[in-house]
Image (tube, grey):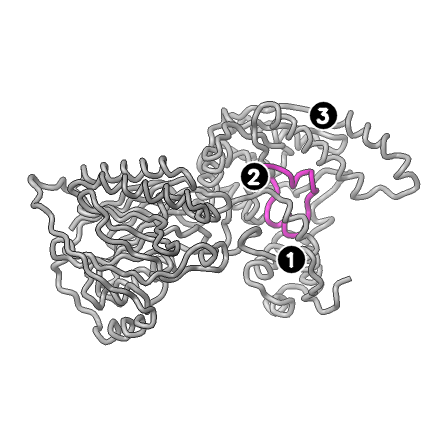
Amino acid sequence: MRIGLAQVNPTVGDLSGNARLVIDGIERAREQGVDIVCFPELVITGYPPEDLVLKPSFVRDNLAKLDLIARETRGISAVVGFVDEDGDIFNAAAFLHDGEVKAVYHKVFLPNYGVFDEKRYFQPGHRCPIVELDGVRIGLSVCEDCWFPSGPMASQAHHGARLLININGSPYHYGKRAPREAMVGGRAADYGAFVAWVNTVGGQDELVFDGNSVVFDPHGKLIAHAESLVPDLLVCDFDTALPIHHSPEKLRYEADAAQRLELDVSEVSITTMSKSGTKPQIKNRLATPLEGAAEIYAAVVLATGDYMRKQGFKKVVIGMSGGVDSALTAAIACDALGPENVIGVRMPSRHTSAESLDDAGMTAENLGMQLMDFSIEPPHEGFEKILAPAFKGTKPGVAEENIQPRIRSTILHALSNKFGYIVLSTGNKSELATGYGTLYGDIAGGYAVLKDITKTTVYELCRHRNTLGPAIPERVITKPPSAELKPDQKDTDSLPPYDELDPILKGYIEEDLSPEELVAVGNKPETVARVIQLVDRSEYKRRQAPPGVKITPRAFGRDRRMPIVNRYNPNGARAK
């Protein structure tokens, strides 16, 4: 049997465009002699469709597209994700063959954690068909259903399925791919079946999907692997007649446990006409997946490009300070959209060093992007004059400093309004976590490229980007970071050194560690207490930050939903 995993990049809500994407994938698979081509979870609607599925017209229109796609399956089978309506709304997979919908599977396990809200929209399914195609028994399932050993896949294997197809919308974060693949391979070995696991690819709001579709044989051996973070059609041949040696006791145990799901197992038999001619020869492909900084960088580039293209933005504008964050943001934007579509803006003040201006200029020159200059001194002086009576007799401080980033934001957004650019903010996760940014200033923008990337990872990505070609001057990477809002300012005036700060942020934000647990792993008690206070009191700022791509296991936004008004103090004393 020859299977194709169509790792495509749909757009949420673009039902016609997504249907065309699926039909084109079917055509490509047919040309390569594929018997079954599989598409990702909810490919017709895009994933996640969120409250669109609450619109009856949206669900009806998605069903119409499924019928349209089904008519294109002459001489081939396809598995397609869609929203089904059968008394309730279901996250579903359809098995299409020769112009007809032959079977429909309803997702059983609905994730309701992290970025997922599927219980808000869908009912858990019980419909679990097994399709027999030319004597080969095939089970269908959707995403989360694969993560439970005593789930529908175990039941399907117990009923004789030799091929288990699992369609996915599995969002990316670093470190996820390897354990995910180990889980899929473990299912194949436990069930004694081939497992074909297809994932979507591309950016959607704050999520990015990494592809990395795979096929495992019944011994848990990886026999095909798609590319990382790009659309791909992975075609794989396998022999369903090979004898399989597995533990019937383990499978029986998992299948018996799955009975509590009350699955409605049905069978559909399909016999195809013998195909004339021979299939084109292929060799099962094992693409080398991206890892480390290369993987993170590619994910952010993909997410940034898709966010712009899918909304129709052509050009972006970035404030170029000469620092490492704006330099990396510019590099990502140039790689995502092309340097001709990236406009950098230098906006020096009385505190901006000549070195910073030179570094911003060199970065722009290396990347081939446009660079504009606006001095903020005239409006800065104007605001000082306007506020002088109110500020008289007070000591200069943060209020005076923050006038500068707010002026810069006004300039960037004026360019955005005038020419249709979208402003990319340049703050990183370390800054956003601690509130080290100015509301309506450097925090403001249409998209926050580095929102989920800590400062230490920023440096790592800069060095990776420079291995791909000249981009970020070495001095930008090595000089002490500074906001340059007052003379001789350094980030360490307000924050712990980033190599101390970022591990605490990771433990507190991503792992929910207590102060005692953070201290137990070697962090200074006074630093832990200070960082936690900064994080907790900055929630109101984060709520007003623009969206940005999720890269870590727990990002700010829909992944971490803390109350703004919150008097819980993990440091011990009642917050004042």
Q: Is residue 554 left or right of residue 495?
A: left
Q: Residues within 10 Å of mark 2 (few under 14, many from 20)?
A: many
Mark-to-mark CA distance, 3 and 1: 39 Å
Find residue 415 and report its horizontal and vertical position in percent. 62, 25
For the point 70% across and 29% down, the residue is 348
Q: Point out the image quarter for the C terminus.
A: bottom right
- 3 vs 1, front mark: 1
Which residue is more in the foreground, 379 or 26? 26
**Vertical arrangement, residue 165 with respect to residue 524, above or below:** above
- 2 vs 1, front mark: 1
Find residue 208 and report its horizontal and vertical position in percent. 45, 46
For the point 56% across and 26% down, the residue is 420
Which residue is under mark 3? 375
**Vertical arrangement, residue 372 with respect to residue 511, above or below:** above
Magenta stretch encompasses residue 75:
no
- Asked whether residue 286 is in view, the answer is no
- 3 vs 2, front mark: 2
- Circle on res. 563: 1
Find residue 79 and report its horizontal and vertical position in percent. 26, 49
The image quarter containing residue 441 is top right
Which residue is under mark 2? 447
Q: Secondary structure at mark 1?
A: loop
For the record, the magenta segment spans 426-448
Closer to the N terminus: mark 3 or mark 2? 3
Closer to the N terminus: mark 3 or mark 1? 3
